[in-house]
């Protein structure tokens, strides 16, 4: 099953992992895909890589710009 890493505007969560088949439902329409993975393990590895890349670029103390950064750094 394919998984998508998504951000959602006006949401307190930084990132969501959503199965590709669930994105077809109306609830997930505002989600924006920033990366895709072929399985659940790869999805978690992509999350870790995104966070590490963000910390390398901006520092780990302030995640207020993470959603914007993740949306621009689409993988």
Image (spheres, rainbow, N blue to C red):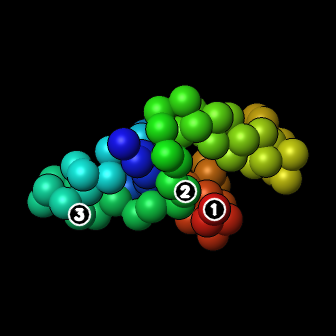
Occupied quadrant, residue 69: bottom right
Q: Residue furthest bottom?
A: 72
Disc 1, disc 2: CB below 8 Å? Answer: yes
Residue that numbered label 2 is attached to:
35
Q: Is residue 7 visible?
A: yes
Q: Residue furthest left?
A: 26
The local secondary structure at tag 1 comes to loop
Disc 1, disc 3: CB below 8 Å? Answer: no
47, 13: nearer the viewer: 47
Q: For the residues marked 1 and 2, what is the alpha-carbon distance in whole angstroms?
A: 5 Å
The local secondary structure at tag 2 comes to strand
47, 70: nearer the viewer: 47
Above or below for 12 versus 68: above
Q: Residues within 10 Å of mark 3 (few under 14, many from 20)?
A: few
Q: Which sits earlier in the primary sequence, circle 1 or circle 2?
A: 2
Residue at 77% x, 39% y is 52
13, 26: nearer the viewer: 26
Residue that numbered label 1 is attached to:
75
37, 51: nearer the viewer: 37
Q: Position of residue 8 (x, y in %)?
A: 38, 56
Q: Which sits earlier in the primary sequence, circle 2 or circle 3?
A: 3
Q: Residues within 10 Å of mark 2 (few under 14, many from 20)?
A: many
Q: For the residues marked 2 and 3, what is the alpha-carbon distance in whole angstroms?
A: 16 Å
Q: Nearer the viewer, mark 2 or mark 3?
A: 2
Give left or right: position of 20 versus 26: right
The local secondary structure at tag 3 comes to loop
Q: Position of residue 31 (x, y in %)?
A: 34, 59
């Amino acid at each position: 099953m394919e998984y998508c890493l998504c951000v959602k505007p006006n949401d307190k969560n930084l990132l969501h992992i959503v199965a590709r088949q669930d994105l077809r439902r109306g609830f997930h329409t505002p989600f924006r895909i920033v990366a895709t993975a072929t399985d659940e393990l790869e999805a978690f590895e992509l999350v870790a890589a995104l966070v590490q890349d963000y910390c390398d670029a901006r520092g780990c103390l302030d995640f207020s710009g993470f959603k914007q950064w993740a949306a621009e750094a689409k993988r």
